Amino acid sequence: GAVVSQHPSRVICKSGTSVKIECRSLDFQATTMFWYRQFPKKSLMLMATSNEGSKATYEQGVEKDKFLINHASLTLSTLTVTSAHPEDSSFYICSARERRMGLAGVHEQYFGPGTRLTVT
Amino acid sequence: GQNIDQPTEMTATEGAIVQINCTYQTSGFNGLFWYQQHAGEAPTFLSYNVLDGLEEKGRFSSFLSRSKGYSYLLLKELQMKDSASYLCAVSRIKAAGNKLTFGGGTRVLVKP
C-alpha cells in the first residue's frame, strides 16, 4: 500500500514554455501533498505544501506565480512550472501524507518516483 | 531556523558496519526520519524515532537523543546494494504542518 505516482517521469521542454507535473496517491487519500526540488548530489528542498481544496503554502524564496500548485482532489496534486528557464532544470519530487496516521504513529510521507525536468 | 547536519560521504566494506550521525537544532520537534535514496530515485522510508532510544529493524537501527539533538542510523552486514544516500529529516509540530526538513544527505559507498 501507500503508493505515490508521478507523471511524467522525464520531460524536456524549451525555454519559455510551461510544464505540468502530476502527483497521485494511488491507494490512499492524501489530505496534504508536498513538492520538493532536488539538485544533483544535494538533498531535498521543500518548495510548497499543498492541502486539498485550499491554496498551497510556499516556502520562503519560492515564487508562487512561477510554480503553480493545484490540489483539486484527495488523490491528485499538480505542479506547473510556468515560463521555464534552464535554471529550473531539476529533479522534482512529490510526497503525500495519509489522512490517518501511519503505522509509525505519525504522519508519514510517501514519496513519488520523481520527475526529471530539463529545460533547453 | 533549523540546522540539520550529517557527513557528506562515508565509505565502508561489504559485511562491515557503518554509523551515520545526524545532529539537529529545531523548535517544535516532532520526530526524526531516516530515508534511503538511490541515485535518480525517490527516497524510501527506513525508520522513525520520536522518543529517546534505539529502534531496530533488521540490519538497520536508528537511535535518538532529544536532549542532545542527535540521531544515528546504523547499517549492519553491509551489502553492495546499500550504496546510496541516506537522508536525515526532522518533523516539526502540527502547527508547522508536520513538514519535513532534510539534512544534506550522506552518500555511502560500499566496497567489495
Image (tube, rainbow, N blue to C red):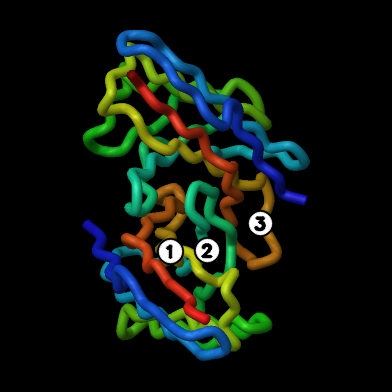
Query: Sequence order check: which comes first, mark 2 or mark 1?
Result: 2
Same subunit, labels 3 and 1: the answer reads: no
Q: Residue at x 28, y 31 (%)?
A: A62
Label placed on residue B75? none
The quarter in which the C terminus of chain A is drawn is top left
Q: Position of residue A90 (x, y in %)?
A: 37, 35
Indicate the secondary structure of the residue bearing disc 1.
Answer: strand
Q: Circle 1 marks a residue in which chain?
A: B
**Pointers 2 and 1 in contact (CB under 8 A)?**
yes
Q: Quadrant of residue B28?
A: bottom left
Label placed on residue B87? 1
* Residue A68 sits above or below residue B68 on the image: above
Same subunit, labels 2 and 1: the answer reads: yes
Q: Residue at x 40, y 85 (%)?
A: B65
Q: Position of residue A40 (x, y in %)?
A: 34, 47
Spatial distance from mark 3 to mark 2, Cα to Cα? 21 Å
Indicate the secondary structure of the residue bearing disc 2.
Answer: strand
Left/right of residue B77 with respect to residue B27 in the rendered view = right
Indicate the secondary structure of the residue bearing disc 3.
Answer: loop
Say if residue B96 shows up in the picture: yes
Camera-nearest residue between B58 and A89: A89
Q: Which residue is mark 2?
A: B36
Q: Which residue is mark 3?
A: A101
What kind of residue is marked 1? Answer: Leu
Q: Residues within 10 Å of mark 1 (few under 14, many from 20)?
A: many
